């Protein structure tokens, strides 16, 4: 059903866990299923120094969190704020249906909201209703 790469990240997630004393800590939910992901980030100036995630969800949500955390390590937060769903689909390398898009986007939405709130924006709640590229 899924490509081997997605299953590999699902079975052996990279960057799973929680960072001690993170600069950014954010939790978000996929309201369709109630699944939740927490992301912790350490910054080095305006760059992601380290990032970890924990939580539960389907293969797509866990694999995309694993792939995203690998991808954003070392990147400037300005670049991450510009990431959209096409970037996540490209990372996953499989076609994503409209329903599964919320699963795929969960980690990115959490990371982006974490950055926004670190920068002083008021983001009271994080859910995939705010999926980038869907008018939010
Ligand atoms: Fe819950 Fe995919 S079914 S995140």
Image: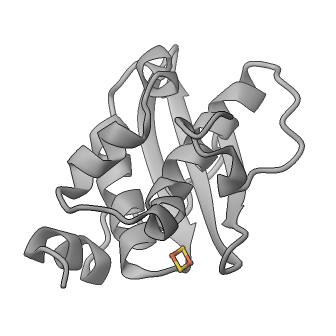
Q: Is residue 2 above or below residue 120?
A: below
Q: Which residue is located at x 82 percent, y 20 percent?
A: 120
Viewer-proximal residue among 126 and 134: 134
Viewer-proximal residue among 102 and 26: 102
Q: Is residue 67 above or below residue 48?
A: below
**If the image is split into quadrants, where does the C terminus sit?**
top right
Inspect this view and state whether residue 23 appears: no
Tell me residue 110's x, y (percent).
62, 48
Q: Which residue is located at x 10 percent, y 76 percent?
A: 4
In the image, is 50 to the left or to the right of 41? left
Q: Which residue is located at x 38 percent, y 49 percent?
A: 69
In the image, is 59 to the left or to the right of 29? left
Task: Tell me how the rendering is colored.
Answer: one colour
Inspect this view and state whether residue 101 appears: yes
Viewer-proximal residue among 38 and 127: 127
Q: Quadrant of residue 7?
A: bottom left
Q: Quadrant of residue 23?
A: top right
Q: Is residue 19 above or below residue 63?
A: above
In the image, is 95 to the left or to the right of 44? left
In the image, is 104 to the left or to the right of 66? right
Figure label count: 0
Q: Which residue is located at x 69 percent, y 47 percent?
A: 25
Tell me residue 24's x, y (percent).
66, 39
**If the image is split into quadrants, where does the N terminus sit?**
bottom left
Tell me residue 42's x, y (percent).
54, 37
Q: Residue furthest left?
A: 4
């Amino acid at each position: 059903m899924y490509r081997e790469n997605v299953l590999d990240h699902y079975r052996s997630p990279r960057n799973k866990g929680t960072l001690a004393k993170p600069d950014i800590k954010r939790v978000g939910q996929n309201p369709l299923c109630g699944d939740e992901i927490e992301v912790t980030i350490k910054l080095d100036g305006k760059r992601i120094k380290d990032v970890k995630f924990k939580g539960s969800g389907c293969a797509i949500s866990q694999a995309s969190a694993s792939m995203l955390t690998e991808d954003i390590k070392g990147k400037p937060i300005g670049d991450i704020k510009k990431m959209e769903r096409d970037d996540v689909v490209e990372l996953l390398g499989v076609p994503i249906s409209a329903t599964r898009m919320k699963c795929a986007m969960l980690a990115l939405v959490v990371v982006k909201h974490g950055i926004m709130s670190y920068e002083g924006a008021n983001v009271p709640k994080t859910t995939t209703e705010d999926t980038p590229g869907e008018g939010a």
